[in-house]
Amino acid sequence: MKSKLTLMLLALTYSGAALAHPGHDHGAMAGLLHPLTGIDHILAMLAVGLWGAQLGGRAQWLLPASFVGFLAAGGALGMSGAALPMVEAGIATSVLLLGLLIGFAVKLKTLPAALIVGGFAVFHGYAHGVEMPAVGSAWLYGVGFVAASAALHGVGLGLGRALRADSGWLRAGGGVISLAGMWLGMAA
């Protein structure tokens, strides 16, 4: 059992393509698939939901909403051709810090927490935007990656609510996410 768990964790943290996600078609399907092809994006989206559930109250909807709004803005920035420095480092840092916030059960007021996740979302959105396929509708692609990200937030929120009764598991999940963020940071 222990070896199976180790293999699963290794598989989750391995992402040779974490810094680039090529091979998508175009339009909404490309946008839907894009966040699901990089462990960096998956972990960050799940972490937003987990932290929202851990904080409770309005944070459960405001953190994902903030992330989605800033994600869309970052995507538009990336599609416009504007430069944003240190995008991959920002993405890796988001995974690391969100994991630490969950792991240490950091309680912040809802607005500062929403601004933190919103700041991280700009990097994720920018990466999605610059990696938009040359063919297809930017609008449909954007709707796709926003919808996939929101769905991952929902999964994280559901997991967080289920694990909230046993905060040890929730905090351990944050620890695993932060370790993955360190690994991604070394790869960036």
Image: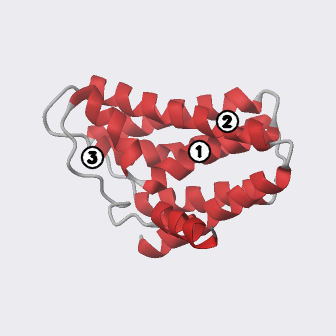
Looking at marks 3 and 2 on the same chain, the residue that comes earlier in the sequence is marked by: 3
Q: Amino acid at mark 1?
A: Leu
The C terminus: image quadrant: bottom left
Looking at marks 1 and 2 on the same chain, the residue that comes earlier in the sequence is marked by: 1
Q: Amino acid at mark 2?
A: Leu
Q: Residue at x 68, y 40 (%)?
A: 159
Residue position for label 2: 157
Q: Is residue 6 visible?
A: yes
Q: Nearer the viewer, residue 5 or 147?
A: 5
Q: Which mark is residue 46?
A: 1
Q: Mark 3 falls on what kind of element?
A: loop
Image position of 34 (left or right of 53): left
Marks 1 and 2: CB-CB under 8 Å?
no
Q: Marks 1/2: CA distance?
A: 7 Å
**Residue most toward the front?**
1
Q: Marks 3/1: CA distance?
A: 21 Å
Q: Marks 3/2: CA distance?
A: 27 Å
Image position of 34 (left or right of 183): left
Residue position for label 3: 131
